[in-house]
Image (spheres, rainbow, N blue to C red):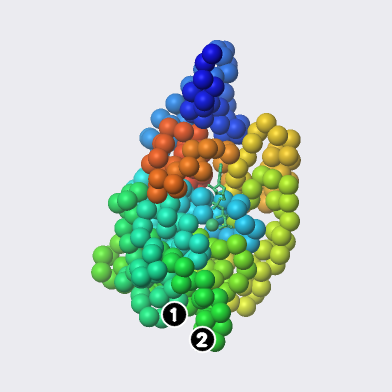
């Protein structure tokens, strides 16, 4: 009897849920042949696509206090996709779990200089930033476990909500002066909470980027997040806007995924990207190789979907 496990890679490559809803399928032929053809044509369109530079640095905080919705996965894959297409990108890992640092293959053991040192004013971003193996144009400010104490340590410090913004502005200025060139995108990966680390990220950014998992309870807690964004807009950063919402872990076979996607689009017609990220084994296994899916399996539907989302984001930047 055939070993059923052998079929898995084929299924993963051709039949990842949801992605094909984003693209018209070819008529005629078997469903698998159609899906393969669709993947190939999407891949070749993306390979030829031009990702324009934004006129100024876009600082996006990737946030949702709900845990496990795909914040880190979205941060690292969108960042890697933009860098792959020639844009200069910085990822700031602002989560003590350090998952973005892991996925981007940078050192983040407790002795490594990190975002913690920056927030505590002991180092600049320039002193802690590391190149990522993912792409030449991608660098990372790592997070170490030290950051878990920062929420409490920050409470007693001056400008406790603006420390990241001050550091980011100083870094951007130093890059402009030294290199005469801008960083195109900064993504800040937030922890699943609305504490001071997340507030610092919201104050440093001009855009909130919210991944929403296509699951039951997806919208629960969203009003609390939006309230917090509003509070930050009112008192600390009037530039902040919810510019981007990305539907993650979409499974086109379930009614639930489709209902959540429809609901989110009705509530946020402008911010919600057309691309939905499918639930995909390739996406979830990439971090264990300290890679993003963009380099781990560029032909997979998950990689293609993230690249397509990155292209939509790049297009927003030149509106
Ligand atoms: N599209 C996807 N398909 C399959 N698995 C996914 C997908 N996106 C994310 N995952 C997996 O879901 C889990 C949660 O994702 P991720 O860590 O990105 O969420 P998060 O919002 O950053 O979580 P946290 O709130 O803990 O920071 C991870 O194991 C990740 O590999
Ligand atoms: Mg995370």
CB atoms at circles 2 and 1 under 8 Å apart?
Answer: yes
Residue at left offset 73%, top offset 39%: 256
Secondary structure, mark 1, is: loop
Residue at left offset 57%, top offset 23%: 25
Please provide percent x and percent y for residue 247. Answer: 61, 46
Please provide percent x and percent y for residue 243. Answer: 58, 56
Quarter holding residue 124: bottom left
Q: Quadrant of the N terminus?
A: top right
Measured along the vertical axis of the image, is residue 158 above or below residue 264? below
The circle on residue 264 is none
Please provide percent x and percent y for residue 192. Answer: 60, 62
The circle on residue 120 is 1
Measured along the vertical axis of the image, is residue 309 above or below residue 198? above
Left-right relation of 9 to 89: right
The circle on residue 157 is 2
Q: Is residue 190 visible?
A: yes
Q: Residues within 10 Å of mark 1 (few under 14, many from 20)?
A: some
**Mark 2 within 8 Å of ligand 1, using the beta carbon:** no
User: 306 or 244: nearer the eye?
Assistant: 306
* Marker count (numbered): 2
Q: Is residue 172 visible?
A: no
Secondary structure, mark 2, is: loop
Q: Residue furthest front?
A: 1
Please provide percent x and percent y for residue 120. Answer: 44, 80
Distance between the Cα atoms at labels 2 and 1? 9 Å
User: 74 or 102: nearer the eye?
Assistant: 102
Measured along the vertical axis of the image, is residue 294 above or below residue 73? above
Measured along the vertical axis of the image, is residue 120 above or below residue 168? below
Residue at left offset 67%, top offset 63%: 225
């Amino acid at each position: 009897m055939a070993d059923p496990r052998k079929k898995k890679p084929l299924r993963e490559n051709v039949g990842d849920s949801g992605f094909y809803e984003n693209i018209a399928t070819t008529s005629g032929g078997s469903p698998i042949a159609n899906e393969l053809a669709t993947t190939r044509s999407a891949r070749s369109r993306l390979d030829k696509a031009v990702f324009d530079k934004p006129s100024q640095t876009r600082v996006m905080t990737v946030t949702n206090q709900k845990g496990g919705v795909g914040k880190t996965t979205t941060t690292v894959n969108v960042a890697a996709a933009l860098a792959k297409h020639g844009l200069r990108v910085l990822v700031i890992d602002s989560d003590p779990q350090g998952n973005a640092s892991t996925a981007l293959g940078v050192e983040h053991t407790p002795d490594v200089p990190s975002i913690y040192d920056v927030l505590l004013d002991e180092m600049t971003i320039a002193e802690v930033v590391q190149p990522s193996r993912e792409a030449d144009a991608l660098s990372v400010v790592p997070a170490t476990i030290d950051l878990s104490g920062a929420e409490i340590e920050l409470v007693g410090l001056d400008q406790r909500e603006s420390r990241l913004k001050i550091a980011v502005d100083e870094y951007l200025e130093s890059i402009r002066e030294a290199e005469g060139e801008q960083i195109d995108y900064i993504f800040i990966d937030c922890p699943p909470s609305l504490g001071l680390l997340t507030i610092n990220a919201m104050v440093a950014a001009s855009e909130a980027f919210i991944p929403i998992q296509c699951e039951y309870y997806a919208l629960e807690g969203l009003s609390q997040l939006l309230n917090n964004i509003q509070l930050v807009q009112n008192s600390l950063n009037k530039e902040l806007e919810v510019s981007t919402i990305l539907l993650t872990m979409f499974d086109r076979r379930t009614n639930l995924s489709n209902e959540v996607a429809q609901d989110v689009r009705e509530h946020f017609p402008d911010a919600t990207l057309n691309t939905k990220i499918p639930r995909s084994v390739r996406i979830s296994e990439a971090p264990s190789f300290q890679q993003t899916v963009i380099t781990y399996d560029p032909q997979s539907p998950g990689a293609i979907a993230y690249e397509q989302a990155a292209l939509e984001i790049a297009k927003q930047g030149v509106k």
